[in-house]
Structure formats: structure tokens, C-alpha cells
Amino acid sequence: MADQDTLIEFPCDFPIKVMGETHENFSDTVVDVIRVHAPEFDATRVEMRASSGGRYISLTCYVYVTSKPQLDDIYRALTSHPSVKVVL
């Protein structure tokens, strides 16, 4: 295993959960941020769920990642975006 500081075996499809306030462009924004670091990311691999009150939206994005640095870059980009509240 090349990445000794992780239990994840790369490359792999990795689920990233992204939450934010409901906004018509939220999913497009998240996809655009991910594609900066994973240009081949397929937007059809996003599962969307609204909160019970409808104020928040949760996206589970299945991203094909090839390394820990790439995954870390995606997490940093998402967590620093103003529309994103939580990334898991």
C-alpha cells in the first residue's frame, strides 16, 4: 500500500457526504468543486436527500479517487466553500 497513513486502498470509489442549505444550484456547485480535483467525476453519481424541514440538503457523491492527496484536496476545497456546512 503506497499510502501508509490511511486504511483506504487507492484507487477506489469513495463516498463523500456534503451538506448545506437548500439552494437550486447547490448540487451543481458541489460537482464543480469536486471536478477541479477529479475532472472525470460523473454528476449522475450523486444521491440527494432533503432534510425533513426542507431547509438543508445532503449530497452523497461517489468519487473515484486515485490517492490520499487527491482526496484531501477535495475535502479541503469542499469544507472551505461558503455554501457547504458539513463534509463527511
Image: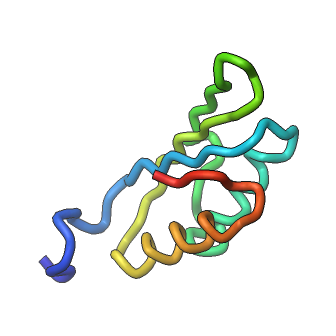
Relative height, residue 52 to residue 15 (above, below): above
In this image, 39 relative to 28: left or right? Answer: left
Pinpoint residue 4: horizontal percent, then vertical percent.
14, 80
Q: Which residue occupies 55% across, 73% down?
A: 76
Picture residue at 32% right of the left edge, 59% below the top = 12
Q: Quadrant of residue 59?
A: top right
**Quarter holding the N terminus?**
bottom left
Query: Which of the pair 57/34 is nearer the observer?
Result: 57
Residue 31 as seen in the image, left or right of residue 11:
right
Residue 58 lies, in percent from the top left, at: 61, 36
Coordinates of residue 84 in the picture (x, y in percent) = 68, 55
Percent x, y of residue 7: 17, 64
> Can you say whether 37 is above or below 21 in the image?
below
Q: How many marks?
A: 0
Q: Which residue is farthest top?
A: 52
Is 86 placed left or right of 20 in the picture?
Answer: left
The image quarter containing residue 54 is top right
Q: At 44% from the left edge and 74% from the top edge, which residue is drawn?
A: 72
Quarter of the figure with residue 80:
bottom right
What's the residue at 60%, 65% (across, down)? Answer: 79
Most extreme residue toward the right is 24
**Colour setting:** rainbow
Front residue of this view, candidates 68 and 35: 68
Q: Is residue 68 above or below residue 17?
A: below
